[in-house]
Amino acid sequence: MPRFKVDEIRNRFANGKDFNEIFDAFEDALIQGIQDVELYRLLFWNSALCPDELCLFGEKLAKEFPSLAYETYMWLASVFEATYSLSDNFELAMQYYRKAQWQSRKKFSHILMLQIVMIRNSTFRHYIGL
């Protein structure tokens, strides 16, 4: 029996500060079979979560719902790309872009490859002081 309504889960994902509280909502969302990527996007952008916690949630989500794996990995990569200068998440961004590429291996993703090149270019420019 679900413990949380979807609105309560959404609120915890977006505004939760306590890992255990967020984790409980996440587990309940999985039990309910919620496959709404927009809901999990709120979770991935929650600034109270550290990179390891985000990876935990993303990996579990991709395992539970393989049909969401590509989008999950792309969202995680985007989050890590946007925050890498703050927390040195460059490697995590690359890792999740590669995972997303692996999920879409049946069709070559030019957009995905462009994202990887852009990250590498911006990192290179950062290191040389441009």
Image (cartoon, helix red, strand yellow):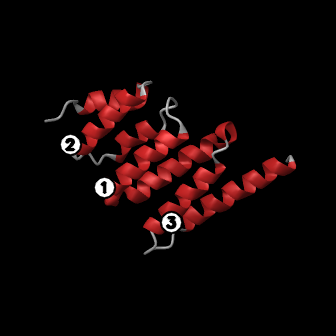
| Residue 39: image location, x then y, percent | 35, 40
Residue drawn at (37%, 29%) of the image: 20
Residues tagged 1 and 3 counted as in contact (Cβ below 8 A): no
Separation of residues labelled 1 and 2 (CA atoms): 12 Å
Question: Callout 3: 10 Å neighbours few (<14), some, many (20+)?
Answer: many
| Residue 87: image location, x then y, percent | 65, 38
Which numbered marker is on residue 65? Answer: 1
* 3 or 2: tag closer to the N-terminus: 2
Which numbered marker is on residue 32? Answer: 2
Task: Name the kind of residue labelled 1 in the image.
Answer: Phe
Relative to 21, say whether 123 is above or below: below
Which numbered marker is on residue 101? Answer: 3
**Residue 27 in which image quadrant:** top left
Relative to 71, say whether 56 is above or below: above
* 1 or 3: tag closer to the N-terminus: 1
Between 38 and 64, the residue placed more toward the observer is 64
| Residue 122: image location, x then y, percent | 73, 52
* 1 or 2: tag closer to the N-terminus: 2
Furthest residue in direction right, as rendered: 129
Find numbered disc 1 in the image and state the secondary structure of the residue it sits on. Answer: loop
Task: Name the kind of residue labelled 3 in the image.
Answer: Gln
**Residue 79 in which image quadrant:** top right
